[in-house]
Image (spheres, helix red, strand yellow):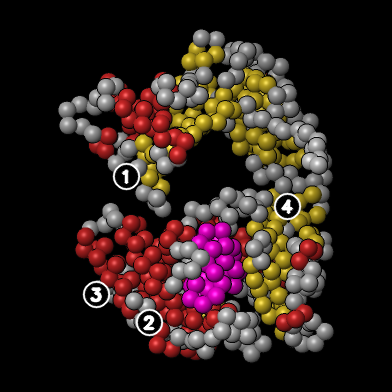
Amino acid sequence: MARKLAKKKTYSNGLQGFSVHTNALGSKATISSLLKERASSPRFAFGKGVTAEALDPETIARAYLQQTLASKAAPSFTAPVVAKVESEFKTIGTEAIPLTGTTTVKFRQTLNKIPVYGALVTVELDEKNQLLGINSSIGTPKGVSPIARISAAEAVTAVSSHPEYKADVTNAVPRLNYFYDVAKSKWTLAFIVEDVPVAKRKAHSRIPVLMDYVVDAGSGKVIATIPRTPTMAIVTAVDCLEANRTFQVKTSGNSKTLLDSTLNVQTFDFKKKDPETKPEALPGSAISNPPSFSPSAVSAHANASEVSSFMRTILMRNNIDGAGGMMISSINCIQVSESVGGLGREWINAFWNGKQMVYGLRLKGRTVLSLSADLDVVAHEMMHGVTDKTAKLEYRFQSGAINESYSDIFGVIVHNFSKPDQGTWDWSIGAGLQPNGRPFRNFQNPPEEGQPDNMKDFVVSPDTDQGDNGGVHANSGIHNKAAYNVLSSIKPDGTFIFTPRDVAIVFYLALTQHLSRTSQFSDSRRAVIQTVRTFFRAQSAADLAERVTAIEQAFDAVGIN
């Protein structure tokens, strides 16, 4: 029998969502109708010989927006009207999206020239300024007078006399907004005072650096305080490699927890339990200070935060799942079945378990060295998570070797990304983490760590643990060497053909858009070439040909053809 669940209280932001996209099956009729309407609409009569492509993105995006708001083809998307005043939409920014070749134009909703807080309409255009989609959240603040009963100066006074926070209002600039009061579930007219420095808080817990204040424009009372850095603190501590690392943590009173709420990254201590026999106990205990953060915890947390930032800023991917989901790491894990050193003292391994990162440890004298010590290892494991969420490459035979190699590729790139000259890079992976001090792999010279670097030396082994699942770790060296060849490809003038960013994006798109469960080395070669043709399509024919040739030669050199 189905169990009746208790209703949970939900909170609204007062906004109504709407979306339409040319590639959405449910939008086909709407898009088709809008397209037909344009043929006879004076809004799209740009002049003889003038096409949408010739216009600036803001102009054509506004035309698409106004058409859709007025069209019967999209009855649920209209400009809200309050007291016979229709909403207007003000442009707040145009942005070219490099990974897709699209352009977005964003609009803010206003009523009576007053912004509706939180409202946003995004119009997306393709390369020829044709409409790809509209995504919006807009509000209807009914029953709210547009006339403030207090002055802007009185709003500042209210902020300065707030009973809990001592704010520096020297440069405060109050701006009227229609604001949805979540606590009361209703709209109100309010002065928003943004980015106010906070000097002191009455309570003992950590103060935010900046605060937004919301002052009711009728009563003159502060009805909301919105921390811009609500519970975060910047901490510097020493990692496993004796380097000072700076990262964000969550604070509560005098306690600091390894949780970066901005990047959604958290680190836990598994306290030498076995992730194989006790998977239900993962991720373990949250790590707080006091006591002081251990070097292992610092390495795992700082490195995970760095990988998250790379994903967001370079790959335009919102964490491993692409949706901003939590990126979790557990340190001090010991899988007894693979442990060394007696009594399960060391486990020299790390893996992505489908949900999170799991890191072993080894002893270096009396020092505990976490497998999260090296940034390249952390990036490697997290990229396994991305592969798991996208291509889902089988972890055996060539597909497994590609799986391993793509993680190595991103491990090396993330680790060295601060050095734009590939000629100065450290090509080792997991340097110093093995008991003999050797790295796990050498990207530049795979045979140095026992891997083949050409298909003629391909390792044929059984699909078993003892057979390395068909040679996934061994044969990844072949694909790694191809990627190294791409990164080190040189023009006649001695400069690199590809930047590190180019290679990161090309291999990322190849992995996530073109590979599937059983892809082979040759499929990866084709995917990378396909991606280069798309990503660099705006370049000259000669430049594009040079890049494609470099990819072909990089794979040819290792026998992948």
Using the image, tell me which numbered label, if any, was put on residue 127: 1
Q: Is residue 262 above or below residue 442?
A: above
Give whichever of discs 1 and 2 has the lower sequence position. Answer: 1
Local secondary structure at mark 1? loop
Was residue 36 drawn as part of the magenta stretch in this picture?
no
**Where, by quadrant of the figure, is residue 208 drawn?**
top right
Query: Which kind of residue does numbered mark 2 sit on?
Result: Val
CB under 8 Å between discs 4 and 3: no
**Which dot marks residue 58?**
none
Q: Residue at x 69, y 69 (%)?
A: 358
User: Of the residues tagged 3 and 2, which is closer to the observer?
Assistant: 2
Q: Is residue 127 left or right of residue 345?
A: left
Image depth: mark 1 or mark 2 in front: 2
Mark 2, Cα crowd under 10 Å, few <14 / some 14-19 / many 20+, is: many
Label 3, label 1: how many angstroms apart (C-alpha)? Answer: 32 Å
Does residue 441 sit above or below 17 in this rendering?
A: below
Q: How many marks?
A: 4
Compute the Cα span from label 4 to label 2: 48 Å
What residue is at 66 percent from the left and 73 percent from the top?
Answer: 350
Per the rendering, the mark at residue 492 is 3
Q: Which residue is mark 4?
A: 250
Q: Position of residue 348 (x, y in %)?
A: 68, 80
Q: Which residue is mark 2?
A: 558
Residue lying at the far front of the rendered structure: 1
Q: Earlier in the sequence, mark 3 or mark 2?
A: 3
Q: Disc 1 marks which amino acid?
A: Glu
Tell us which disc is closer to us: 4 or 2: 2
